């Protein structure tokens, strides 16, 4: 069965510091992986996606993520965090199960940025 | 850029009442989803819909829930008799084809009193 684990519920970083948010997945075939960001009271916005090819993918707002098949991970990174990055971040895996295309989300990581 | 729209943005209802949450997916999209997020918790899958029928539903999506695509543009989620624990943010999403990223609406906050 598909599953996604985000081990860090809360992360606090200082503005300008680097960031890495962890995501581990379980899926029987090659997964389709996504990171979404949710600002308070808002919907979910796609940051980036991985389907195949280059395992380092670039997204919007200066984010990137690296797919590591051997570790079943898809960690999100940003070299220098801005105060506006404070939000909740969700990792998701998509794939076909029993003929249905389905997305499963992790529990989210809430990012706090200190000035 | 086309977007998924949801109405209303906030719905308050009394326990036991029926509610209908409305969504207009992106026009050329073919797969439609409802997700739920209880305050501060994870985004939970409710149901997927393709080719005018439910393709999968979660255990949350019991007999009190139903979905409909009445007119080729709207996609609705109905809760027949709301319970306090139905209070949550409900997100509609759509995709054009399998394996493409979900496009989410801004959600409807449902408050059951």
Image (spheres, coloured by chain):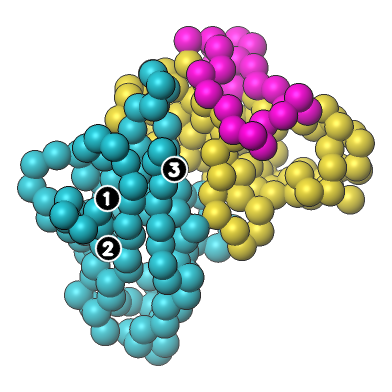
Chain colours: A cyan, B yellow
Q: Which residues are magenta?
A: B51-75
Residue at disc 2, secondary structure: strand
Looking at the rendered structure, whether the residues under marks 1 and 2 are on a common chain is answered as yes
Q: Earlier in the sequence, mark 1 or mark 2?
A: 1
Q: Residue at x 84, y 48 (%)?
A: B84
Examine the structure image and report whether residue B58 is included in the region drawn in magenta. Answer: yes
**Would residue B24 be seen by someone viewing this image from the given angle?**
no
Instruction: Please name the residue that numbered disc 3 is placed on.
Output: A104
Instruction: Please name the residue that numbered disc 2 is placed on.
Output: A76
In this rendering, is residue A37 above or below A34? below
Q: Are marks 2 and 3 in contact (CB under 8 Å)?
A: no
In this rendering, is residue B77 above or below B9? above
Examine the structure image and report whether residue A82 is included in the region drawn in magenta. Answer: no
Categorize mark 3 by other alpha carbons within 10 Å: few (<14), some (14-19), many (20+): some
A92 horizontally vs B22: left or right: left
Give coordinates of residue B97: x percent, y percent.
Answer: 32, 22
Instruction: Please name the residue that numbered disc 1 is placed on.
Output: A48
Mark 2 and mark 3: span between their CA atoms? Answer: 17 Å
Categorize mark 1 by other alpha carbons within 10 Å: few (<14), some (14-19), many (20+): many
- Name the chain under label 2: A
Q: Earlier in the sequence, mark 2 or mark 3?
A: 2
Which corner quadrant of the image does residue A102 belong to? top left
Q: Are marks 1 and 2 in contact (CB under 8 Å)?
A: yes
Give coordinates of residue A66: x percent, y percent.
Answer: 18, 58
Mark 1 and mark 2: span between their CA atoms? Answer: 9 Å
């Amino acid at each position: 069965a598909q599953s996604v684990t985000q081990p860090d519920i809360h992360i606090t970083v200082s503005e300008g510091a680097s960031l890495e948010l962890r995501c581990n997945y379980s899926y029987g075939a090659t997964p389709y992986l996504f990171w979404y960001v949710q600002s308070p009271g808002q919907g979910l916005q796609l940051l980036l996606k991985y389907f195949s090819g280059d395992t380092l993918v670039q997204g919007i707002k200066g984010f990137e993520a690296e797919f590591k098949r051997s570790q079943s991970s898809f960690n999100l990174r940003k070299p220098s965090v801005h105060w506006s990055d404070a939000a909740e971040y969700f990792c998701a895996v998509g794939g076909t199960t029993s003929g249905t295309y389905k997305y499963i989300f992790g529990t989210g990581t809430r990012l706090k940025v200190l000035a | 850029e086309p977007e998924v729209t949801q109405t209303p943005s906030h719905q308050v209802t009394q326990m036991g009442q029926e509610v209908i949450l409305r969504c207009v997916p992106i026009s050329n999209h073919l797969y439609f989803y409802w997700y739920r997020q209880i305050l501060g918790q994870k985004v939970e899958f409710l149901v997927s819909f393709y080719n005018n029928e439910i393709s999968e539903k979660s255990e949350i999506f019991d007999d009190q829930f139903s979905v409909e695509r009445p007119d080729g543009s709207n996609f609705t989620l109905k809760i027949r008799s709301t319970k306090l624990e139905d209070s949550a943010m409900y997100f509609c999403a759509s995709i054009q084809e399998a394996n493409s990223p979900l496009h989410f609406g801004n959600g409807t906050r449902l408050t059951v009193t």
